[in-house]
């Protein structure tokens, strides 16, 4: 009888702790190329919720400065899907957290001025081990593009490279 009571208490504590855990997810665009190792080192000991509490990354760590926060959410770890709408933008988040590994997909949709009910949609997805504690990079996307600028009758084409990082933290 005593063993059954202890077992029930352990199950209740484990279940309550899994539902009490918070999962912070963010998508940050950096204006320069980054690597997973470099970002994970810079994120060590940081709070993802504090870093992404504005339109730009808020931190004293040099490697994380200058990032633009495209998406940030703090979700209960037991909730597998959410949808958020603000004005003409929408964010759909689906994730699975099993055996210390996170699989996540975030779709960002924005209204476009090209007509009625036109949306631009971008999907970020990835999977990686996610231990509790420091934020970890789940997926990294590097985008190389060319931008044209015209200044005083001079046209110039520049190569730009940005890095989009899907980052998560289990706390």
Image (spheres, helix red, strand yellow):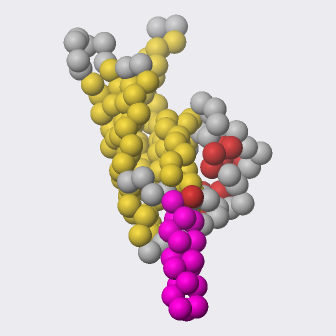
In front here: 1 or 91? 1
Q: Residue at x 57, y 58 (%)?
A: 20
Q: Residue at x 63, y 49 (%)?
A: 48
Total marks shown come to 0
In front here: 28 or 20? 20
Residue 36 in view (yes/no): no
Relative to 168, residue 122 above or below: above
Left or right: where 41 falls relative to 149: right
Left or right: where 59 falls relative to 70: right
In front here: 103 or 34? 103
Relative to 108, residue 6 above or below: below
In which quadrant is the C terminus drawn?
bottom right
Q: Position of residue 117 (x, y in %)?
A: 23, 18
Q: Position of residue 2 (x, y in %)?
A: 58, 91
Question: Is-magenta flag for residue 165?
Answer: no
Q: Which residues are magenta?
A: 1-19
Q: Residue furthest front?
A: 1
Relative to 29, residue 128 above or below: below
Left or right: where 142 falls relative to 167: left
Q: Position of residue 108 (x, y in %)?
A: 37, 36
Which image quarter: residue 68?
top right
Prevalent SS, magenta region? helix
Which image quarter: residue 67?
top right
Q: Position of residue 125 (x, y in %)?
A: 36, 53
Question: Is-magenta flag for residue 13?
Answer: yes
Left or right: where 132 falls relative to 90: right
Q: Residue at x 57, y 77 (%)?
A: 9
In front here: 18 or 5? 5
């Amino acid at each position: 009888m005593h063993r059954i009571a202890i077992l029930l208490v352990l199950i209740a504590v484990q279940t309550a702790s899994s539902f009490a855990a918070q999962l912070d997810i963010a998508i940050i665009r950096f204006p320069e190329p980054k690597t997973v190792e470099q970002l994970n080192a810079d994120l060590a000991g940081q709070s993802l919720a504090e870093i992404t509490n504005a339109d730009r990354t808020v931190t004293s760590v040099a490697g994380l400065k200058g990032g633009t926060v495209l998406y940030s959410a703090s979700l209960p770890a037991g909730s597998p899907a959410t949808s958020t709408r603000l004005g003409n933008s929408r964010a759909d988040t689906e994730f699975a957290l099993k055996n210390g590994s996170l699989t996540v997909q975030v779709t960002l949709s924005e209204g476009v001025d090209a007509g009625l009910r036109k949306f631009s949609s971008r999907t970020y997805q990835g999977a990686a081990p996610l231990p509790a504690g420091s934020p970890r990079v789940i997926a990294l996307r590097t985008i190389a593009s060319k931008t044209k600028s015209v200044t005083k009758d001079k046209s110039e084409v520049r190569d730009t490279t940005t890095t989009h990082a899907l980052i998560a933290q289990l706390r």
